[in-house]
Amino acid sequence: MCGINGIVDLKHVADPAATIKVMNDRLAHRGPDAEGSFVNDTVALGHRRLSIIDLSDAGNQPFHSFDGKQTLVFNGEIYNYIELKAKLADYPFKTGSDTEVLIAAYRKWGKDCLLQLNGMFAFALWDEDQRSLLIARDRMGIKPLYFAWQGNGLVFSSEMRALLSSNLVKKKVDSLALVDYLRYQTVHAPRTMIEGVQMLEPGTYMLITDSETINEHYWHLAASSKQIIDGRDRILKNINESLHRSVEMRMRADVPFGAFLSGGIDSSAIVGLMAGVTDHPVSTFSVTFDEEEFSEGVYAEMIAKKFNTRHTEIRLKADDFLQMIPDALQAMDHPSGDGPNTYVVSKVTKESGITMALSGLGGDELFAGYGIFTQATALLDKRWVMSFPKFLRSFAGRGLQLAKPSIASRKTASILKEDYLDLEYFYPYSRQALDEKQVGALVKGKLPKNAVHQFLLEEMAQDMPAFSLNYLSKISYAEIRTYMQNVLLRDSDQMSMAHALEVRVPFLDHELVEYVMGVADPEKYPHTPKKLLDDSLGTLLPREIVDRPKMGFTLPWEQWMKGTLRSFCEEKLQRLGEREYFNARGIDQTWRSFLNGSKFITWSRVWHLVVLENWLQEHGIE
């Protein structure tokens, strides 16, 4: 796990070596173990290293092929590097690193090497013979890569802050992205908060030569998922075996590693599987609190005892967490309404001597763990509602809000006003923080189209692969491609790497994802929490873990924002209201509604505004 930087077409850069050095310095937190750069007449590449596999200096980057014809900067891990190395016996390997395996795989298969890789990665590979640069990102979008075109030149990096430090990117807000953020507390790729800066999409490569630039998918989640016709016993066996393989490969490391353990089904499953493939006690870490209403410590302790882990319980008081918030905000590379939770867990894990940790991220999206899966299925039986005239449905929605004022009733009222009760129309409300009326009160001018709605309309069209997915898999597809990739994975990367901690996610092994996405709805429906996953694990987990209510990681944010953090929030909101895109009166009314206990404006629907202004100030954004 590392950080990479690069510039293509150096004619517009006064001092490429110095620029790459500045960019590398901004990524020092990602790679404290080594730094390097490569500059020729066409490209400049930079790297910061966090050593995980082959800790020797021979694994430092930029990494050159044995004859010097290829140069690679690489962020991430290739988990199947041992198996690939066996297929590349004609290459004269000099290290035990997965980096060298990647460069050898490119020499054998060219860009098609991407189809051979099982891992999380973002890399750039310069080929002197072809005079080309291959840039690629892993299938599931676990590792980030930002880029911006400047005339005929390209600048790219693992983090936005390094791009901004290059002085090759104008620090100007993208107004469309801004509204997307207000709606969803994030910006959906490929767009970012900065005008002209994009994210390379998951499963995509970019091949740049003197004559052309090719930007294509080498893998597509929906297109790669095939209908599974196996019986249930075979399905459970295949999932179990795939999970074991995924966990075992992700335990390959030459540094101390462990696992996050919340005590939920997903993290408990990962710990149980880890314990089954090693003779040594697994190191597990959980953050617990004295306040029982948001502490899962008892469940984490239960799993730790069952699997005889070397368990570290980090007990924090809410005020301890509160004191870390300024550092968490400063660590935020791209604004997000969430993130501090991951920052704290990563911080205490790293301080306990761990360099790599496995996480249960992705289990909910893949195995129907969220309420949206059952709610969306229930809506299929209510399509008759849409036969009523829209004015009657709107009237019923207003009545529901008056009778049961809440965010849920407000969203239901909005759904009732839609033209159709299809996934593309109701799903966008499920993760929306502020609705259209609320966003409209905050900004000036007409609102752009909803990015999630537009994405689903395009992806679920009849001529697109996602159209043929099973219904529950369509919901998984929506969750993975919007919420998981643009919130959970982005937060996980930026907050863990703020502490030079690598996080691996076994549930996002692409072979496992492809298989589960093809499982029929009757086999996957969560009659009990994540039943398909639970059944595939057999008796691995205690029933107390499987059957307990889903808690999540919550903290007393409302009390903080009305108390200790109030002056901080008000200062940020006032400055946000002074920016040209915003309506100061609308921001003030939103804040007052929160302070007065509005059922429609909870703390999270204000906090992301505070985070936004803090981020804009930190990075000097117009």
Image (spheres, rainbow, N blue to C red):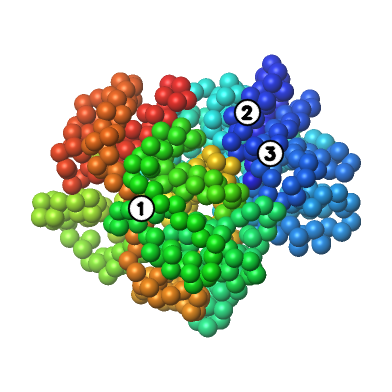
Residue 348 placement (x, y as % from top left): 49, 47
Q: Quadrant of the N terminus?
A: top right
Residue 588 placement (x, y as % from top left): 22, 29
Height in image: 15 above or below 593? above
Residue 140 placement (x, y as % from top left): 56, 53
In the rendered structure, the answer to whether residue 160 lies left or right of residue 66 reads left
Residue 184 quadrant: top left
* Separation (CA) of disc 1 from disc 3: 33 Å
Of pointers 3 and 2, the one earlier in the residue sequence: 2
What residue is shown at x 57% (from left), y 54% (from top)?
A: 357
* Separation (CA) of disc 1 from disc 2: 36 Å
What residue is shown at x 75% (from left), y 40% (from top)?
A: 60
Q: Secondary structure at mark 3?
A: loop
Residue 33, numbered label:
3
Q: Secondary structure at mark 2?
A: helix
Crowd band around label 1 with a 10 angstrom C-alpha radius: few (<14), some (14–19), many (20+)? some
In the rendered structure, the answer to whether residue 435 lies left or right of residue 541 reads left
Q: How many marks?
A: 3
The residue identified by callout 1 is 289
Q: Secondary structure at mark 1?
A: strand
Of pointers 1 and 3, the one earlier in the residue sequence: 3
Dot 2 amino acid type = Asp
The residue identified by callout 2 is 25
In the rendered structure, the answer to whether residue 36 lies left or right of residue 585 reads right
Dot 1 amino acid type = Phe
Height in image: 72 above or below 551? above
Give the camera-side residue of 506 and 287.
Answer: 287
Crowd band around label 3 with a 10 angstrom C-alpha radius: few (<14), some (14–19), many (20+)? some
Dot 3 amino acid type = Asp
